């Protein structure tokens, strides 16, 4: 899951785990510095009676980092087949997880043929191994307004008209990180503390 910050990527994964927890779904969160343990973790959980999501939040790699190569091998299964009770989920603000630069896009011309940069292919191969990519983009102004009003209703905000709530929400988002679901929630949290229900 990739896209703008505050759009619900991590929340979506937590919601999946909460919904299916009683059916035996569990989540294991790991970080980049723990990738070397991935094979061992999968080996420990593969014969359990639960289903597991191995979760990597806010995953991205800088140009000099090579940990993504370990992850590529694990996702493909390496020598051992990936068990049926394990899925790997990641969230990132970067579409391709790895920082891309314009120099990556310099192609080589041989005998009039253009060959795509192998650097790009190497970097894209990681995200392609996940199998499914879901984009989470910032809401439009109209969608943001709808989110704010719905959250205000759910939280029992009274004493303000919709127009007043939206006017304050627009001021809030200009000062606090722009349009996103997270900003809408933070604004309504602020209202809960300052407005009578």
Image (tube, helix red, strand yellow):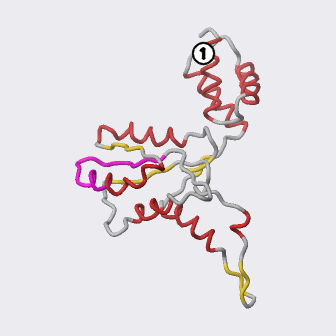
Q: Residue furthest front?
A: 64
Residue 55: x and y in percent read: 43, 47
What kind of element bears circle 1?
A: helix
Tell me what residue is drawn at x 56 percent, y 19 percent: 155
Q: Is residue 127 left or right of residue 114?
A: left
Q: Is residue 84 above or below residue 115?
A: above
The image quadrant of residue 172 is top right
**Between residues 109 and 86, which one lies in front from this camera angle?**
109
Q: Residue furthest top?
A: 196
Residue 81: x and y in percent read: 32, 66
Residue 179: x and y in percent read: 70, 36
Q: Is residue 5 above or below residue 85?
A: above
Q: Is residue 81 above or below residue 118?
A: above
Q: Is residue 126 left or right of residue 40?
A: right
Quarter of the image for the C terminus: give it: top right
Magenta region, residue range: 42-56
Q: Is residue 165 left or right of residue 127?
A: right
Tell me what residue is drawn at x 64 percent, y 29 percent: 184
**Between residues 181 and 125, which one lies in front from this camera angle?**
125
Q: Is residue 144 left or right of residue 51?
A: right
Say how many tags the image has.
1
Give the residue number, with chain letter if any, for mark 1: 192
Residue 150: x and y in percent read: 60, 27
Tell me what residue is drawn at x 76 percent, y 30 percent: 174
Tell me what residue is drawn at x 74 percent, y 21 percent: 168
Q: Is residue 14 magenta?
A: no
Q: Residue furthest bottom?
A: 111
**Between residues 100 and 166, which one lies in front from this camera angle?**
100
Within 10 angstroms of label 1, few (less than 14), some, or many (20 or more) residues?
A: some
Q: Is residue 44 magenta?
A: yes
The image quadrant of residue 181 is top right
């Amino acid at each position: 899951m990739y896209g703008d910050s505050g759009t619900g990527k991590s929340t979506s994964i937590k919601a999946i785990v909460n919904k299916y927890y009683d059916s035996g779904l569990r989540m294991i969160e790991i970080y980049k510095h723990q990738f070397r343990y991935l094979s061992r973790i999968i080996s420990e959980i593969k014969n359990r009676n639960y289903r597991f999501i191995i979760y990597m939040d806010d995953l991205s790699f800088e140009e000099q980092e090579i940990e993504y190569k370990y992850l590529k091998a694990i996702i493909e299964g390496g020598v051992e087949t990936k068990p049926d009770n394990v899925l790997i989920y990641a969230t990132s603000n970067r579409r391709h997880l790895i920082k891309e630069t314009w120099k990556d896009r310099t192609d080589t011309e041989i005998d009039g043929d253009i060959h795509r940069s192998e650097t790009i292919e190497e970097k894209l191969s990681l995200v392609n191994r996940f199998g499914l990519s879901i984009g989470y983009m910032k809401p439009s102004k109209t969608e943001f307004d709808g989110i704010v009003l719905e959250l205000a209703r759910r939280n029992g905000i009274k004493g303000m008209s919709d127009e007043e709530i939206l006017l304050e929400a627009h001021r809030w988002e200009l000062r606090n990180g722009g349009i996103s679901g997270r900003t809408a929630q933070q604004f309504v949290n602020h209202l809960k503390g300052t407005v009578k229900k």
